[in-house]
Each structure stands twice: as C-alpha cells, then as structure tokens.
Image: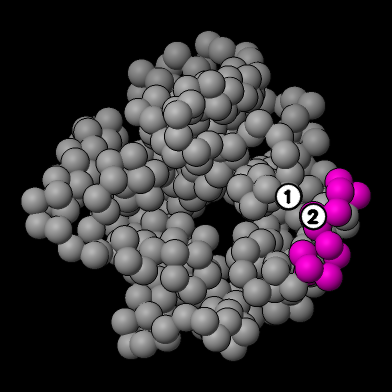
Amino acid sequence: MKPHKKSKKLKKENTYFDSLTGVRTIAAHMVLFHHLIYDKYLHVPLAHLYNGFTIFFVLSGFLITFHNYKPVVQNQFSSRKYFLKRFARIYPVYLLFLIIHVLLRKDQNYDFSFWFMNLTLIKGWSAKYIYSGIGQAWTLTMEETFYAIAPLLFLFLRRVKIWMMMILSLLLGLAHYFLGRMYPNPHFFMDFYSITQTGFFFMFLPFAFGISAALVVVGQPSIWANILSRSKKITDLGFYGLIGSLIFIEYFKPFSAPFWHYSIYQSAATLFLVPLSTSLLFIGLCKENSFLKRFLSRPSMVLLGKASYVLYLIQLGPVATYLAKTINVSNGLFNIFIYILALNFLSIVIYKFFEESIAKQIRQFL
C-alpha cells in the first residue's frame, strides 16, 4: 500500500505548478505599473506593460487545458464541477468589489443596463460598457467567454488543429470589426487597434497559445512538441522572447500619438509575439529546472500570486484612489513604493479572509 500512496501523492503534486502561480505576481504588477505610468505617477518610458493581461490569458488557456483536456476527450468531464470551480474563482471577489464601487462612486448612472452588463460579466462585448464599473474587469469577459467554450474546443481539437481555430478566430474578429463599421452602434468597437486589444475573437489568440503549450506539457504529439523535445533552454527562449516582445512594442508605438495609442505592430506583438514567448516560458517552467523557476516558486511569490486576482481588481477604482490620496502617491518614489506595499497587503488580507474562505465553501458542493 505504501508505494501506491506515494504514486498518488506524486501525481497530485505534478498537477500544480508553483512557478506559474508566481507568474501571476509578475503579470498583475505589470498591469499595476502600467496604470501608475498611465496616471503619470511613474515617469518611465514603459507604456505597454498592460501586456500583463495577455500573460494572464495565456495562463488561463494553459491551466484550463492542462486540467480539463484529457477529462473532456476521455468522457470523464463534469460540467457541474468545472463551472462551479470557475464561478468560485471569479465571481465572489468580483461581486464584492463591484458593490464597493457602486457604494463609493456616486458619479455614474447605475441603470438596468449597467447592472445587467456588469453582473453577467458580458460588458467586455460592448464598447459602451466595457470600462463601466470596475474598469479593468473587462478582461473577465474574455475569461468568462473562454471558460464557456473551452470544453467544446477540446472536443474539436480531436479533428481540428489549434492553428485552424486561430485563423477562424481572426476572421471572426475582422467580421466583428467590419460589422461595427457598416452598422454603427454604441456597443460596437469602431477603432481597429482597440478591438485587436480588447475584442474576444482577437484576444482568443493568447488563450490558443496557452492551449498549445498545455498540449505539449500533457504529452499530445505535435510538430511543436517534437521540436521542443530537442531543446534544453526553453525557459530562456521564452523569457528573453517575452522581454524582446515588450521592447518591440515600445519601439514601434506611434510617435505622433499619445503613448497608449496602438499601431499595427503593437497589435501583432500583443496577439502573437507576447503569447508565443509566454507559452514557451510556461513549457520551460513545467519541464526544466531553472533559476527563474526557483525564484517564481518561492513562498512569497506564490502567496502574492494567489492574491493577484484581488490586486488586479483593486488597483483601479475607489479603494485605490483612497489609498493613493492618503499616501500621496504623487510625492515621489518612496510613496509609490508604500502604495504598492499597501495594495499588496490589502490583497493578501482579502484573499486569506474572503476569497479563499468563500471558494472553499462553494467547493463543498462539488
């Protein structure tokens, strides 16, 4: 019986990657620094750290595939268990901060449409409501949409290659854009570069790269898997590729426009270069032992990673505004450092005493 118990333990350990939780810490802080730069609290030439959300999308594609691909294709998938886990992961904390936002912000119109778009988390499909409520939560629309279709995608993957799905998604993204141009509507995105950064059909590409990486890790045969099996530096390739992609985006930003505006090069990098590099990084972190893996797996990085969802939700809005004013963020780097520490401390407290507790209660129904 002892060897049997040991093998079960090893199997359980191999389904959780501390280093990928540590990646959440980096991605959430990339977005936080982007907002600090955007709001002119930090004066550094790094305008496009918003690509932290691209890393989150790749990570979601990777983890959802890693944990659910085989159960789906082997007819062992429980939709009830799957969607209850997704609900526990996203909704309780989001609802908490949406209520706080509504209670503290009296300058917005909280009509039926606002509540419908925000409570259902479909606001990211609407150009009118995408930044309403918790502005940055538009990415949860992308997550929610992917969660909903992922099991179906896994079934299609038995007959259709992932690159075919990516091409189809790009075509649907273009159709979505031209539909808005032909039939103007406040819910349609009229700017091409904006829709490539926030529209689901375009944003599906980072999820797809995550799916591809997970298929390599779970051992699905492919040309990509054969090529990577001969490489011993996948982590380095992904890490330096990611750094290079971010530099590329900064270099090709349009000089005649404000720094947050997009160019076709930026869109291409966000949709292809950053996700490709990130997916290689994830494969390396799962298969190789490296300094970066050990760093990201440190208990402090893992804890911050677990609390990163809360950090992501509070880094904009009334809570962040109150902290910024109290700490006087505009008064130098030391105050910014204290502000970041305060946000992280608050995130950990809310994670420990609310998010983790609520999630455990919901999972009792599994």
Contact? badges 2 and 1 (CB < 8 Å) = yes
Q: Nearer the viewer, residue 110 or 226?
A: 110
Describe the element under mark 2 as helix, strand or loop: helix
Query: Is residue 23 something one can see in this rendering?
Result: yes
x then y, percent, for residue 144: 39, 63
Q: For mark 1, what is the residue?
A: 41
Q: Nearer the viewer, residue 33 or 143?
A: 33
Side of 357 where 133 appears, left or right: left
Describe the element under mark 1 as helix, strand or loop: loop
Residue 52 position (above or below residue 136): above
Query: Is residue 269 something one can see in this rendering?
Result: no
Q: Residue lying farthest top? A: 230
What residue span does the magenta drawing correspond to?
323-334
Q: For mark 2, what is the residue?
A: 330
x then y, percent, for residue 211: 41, 40
Q: Amino acid at mark 1?
A: Tyr
Q: Amino acid at mark 2?
A: Ser
Residue 42 position (above or below residue 71): above
Q: Nearer the viewer, residue 349 or 88?
A: 349
x then y, percent, for residue 113: 31, 82
Residue 85 lies in the magenta stretch: no
Residue appearing at x 70%, y 73% in the figure: 319
C-alpha gap between disc 2 and disc 1: 6 Å
Q: Main secondary structure of the magenta part?
A: helix
Q: Where is residue 341, by image quadrant?
A: bottom right
Q: How is the image coloured?
A: one colour
Residue appearing at x 67%, y 58% in the figure: 308
Residue 320 position (above or below residue 269): below
